Image (spheres, helix red, strand yellow):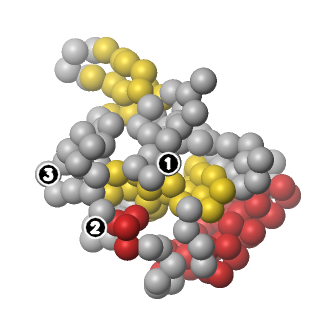
Amino acid sequence: MPDEYYASSPVLEAFIAHVLDVVGATPSPPRRVERMRPAFGELLAASNWLPDEFTWANPNSKMGGGIASYLIYRRADRSLTLHALIVPVGAQTPIHDHLAWGLVRLPCLLSPFTLLGSDLGCVLRHAYDLPHGTVHDFRSGYANVECDNS
């Protein structure tokens, strides 16, 4: 199975090539993140590489509130993903874990972007209900790609 691109541009493809080089040459996750950070900033500063449809809320969101996670890139072995997260005004995600190393950009006015060492939307993760002291499993999913949960 080949790597999957759900958006395409020279800027994006150069960023992913850099990330794959870093992953292959750097076994330490903290060092990987350090080496990827400048290129991640350059990607996010570039314009016109993300299709407009990756910036819309999703009324059918599994996370509720119109929250949408759009898969942009996924490595064939599911060990790396890049996605855009749309959180409409007034919506909020539950307290949750990611179970992976990665880079997360949480700007005030732009869509957050996440590069993680997992298939974040399709892996089983945990949401924490602090007032009730409970934890439950969940898959956040993607707005543009179905997960194979078999």
Earlier sequence position, callout 2 versus callout 1: 2
Q: Residue 108 carries which label?
A: 2
What is the secondary structure assignment of the residue under circle 3? loop
What's the residue at 50%, 48% (across, down)?
145
Q: Which mark is residue 145?
A: 1
- Percent x, y of residue 57: 27, 57
Query: What's the distance in space between the residues labelled 2 and 1, CA to CA?
Result: 26 Å
Specify the amino acid type for callout 1. Val
| Residue nearest the viewer, comparing 32 with 143 | 143
Residue 127 position by quadrant: top left
Left/right of residue 6 with respect to residue 88 in the rendered view: right
Marks 2,1: beta carbons within 8 A: no
Question: Looking at the image, is 50 positioned above or below residue 54?
Answer: below
Specify the amino acid type for callout 3. Gly
Specify the amino acid type for callout 2. Cys
What's the residue at 76%, 61% (across, down)?
20
Earlier sequence position, callout 2 versus callout 3: 3
Left/right of residue 135 with respect to residue 123 in the rendered view: left
Q: Which residue lies furthest to the bottom in this view?
A: 47
Q: Residue 90 carries which label?
A: 3
